[in-house]
Image (cartoon, rainbow, N blue to C red):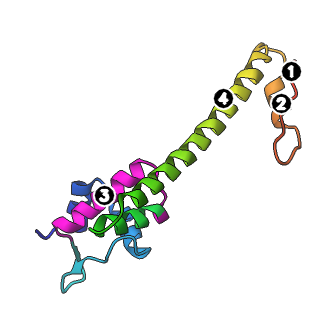
Amino acid sequence: MNLSIGQASKSAGVSAKMIRYYESIGLIAPPRRSAAGYRFYDEADIRTLRFVRRARDLGFPVEDIGRLLALWRDKDRASADVKKLARQRIAELDARIAALASMRRALERLTAHCHGDDLPDCPILDELAVDETPPGPLKIGA
């Protein structure tokens, strides 16, 4: 099978721009090229691109995807190494979920204190204008 970058993109569900990017950073090997310089992808390339896409869908950063690809290709790998990367990703996701939940609670408190009427007073804007670095706890509501 010799697929062009456009065909490979459709088959793997990865944009041509991302394929070029993955090649440029060494995440995937450069494909064979025609005499005219066109890229050609085979079934192994498509499987790799699908692997990368799925890992990205799960939120793995590029560095971890490189490690996962190396483990995937290493038939003597220890599954413990793969599980360790997945557990680290879970911990990172949990931290992001907690941060998002905190932001949501803060916005809930702010909107609860906003009258939402025709008057100009707005505790949401007042809180956003507070000059604190790093952001501190919300001052309203007690």
Of 104 and 119, nearer the camera is 104
Please identify, in this view, whether the residue under mark 2 or under mark 1 is nearer the observer: 2
Above or below residue 141? Residue 50 is below
Instruction: Check residue 94 for magenta coloring.
Output: no
Please identify, in this view, whether the residue under mark 4 or under mark 3 is nearer the observer: 3
Please identify, in this view, whether the residue under mark 2 or under mark 3 is nearer the observer: 3
Above or below residue 41? Residue 106 is above
Of 48 and 130, nearer the camera is 48
Q: Quadrant of residue 122?
A: top right
Q: In this figure, which residue is indicated by the disc labeled 3?
A: 51
Q: In this figure, which residue is indicated by the disc labeled 4?
A: 104
Magenta-tinted stretch: 41-63
Mark pair 2, 4: CA separation? 12 Å
Residue at 73 percent across and 28 percent down: it is 106
Q: Amino acid at mark 1?
A: Asp
Q: In this figure, which residue is indicated by the disc labeled 1?
A: 121
Q: Secondary structure at mark 3?
A: helix
Badge 3: how crowded within 10 Å, few (<14), some, or many (20+)? some
x and y percentages locating residue 97 in the rendered image: 58, 37
CB under 8 Å between callouts 1 and 3?
Answer: no
Q: Is residue 23 left or right of residue 45?
A: right
By secondary structure, the bulk of the magenta-drawn segment is best described as: helix
Q: Amino acid at mark 2?
A: Leu
Q: In this figure, which residue is indicated by the disc labeled 2?
A: 138
CB under 8 Å between callouts 2 and 4?
Answer: no
Q: Earlier in the sequence, mark 1 or mark 3?
A: 3
Q: Amino acid at mark 4?
A: Arg
Mark pair 1, 3: CA separation? 52 Å
Q: Is residue 15 left or right of residue 6?
A: right
Badge 2: how crowded within 10 Å, few (<14), some, or many (20+)? few
Q: Earlier in the sequence, mark 2 or mark 1?
A: 1
Q: Earlier in the sequence, mark 4 or mark 3?
A: 3
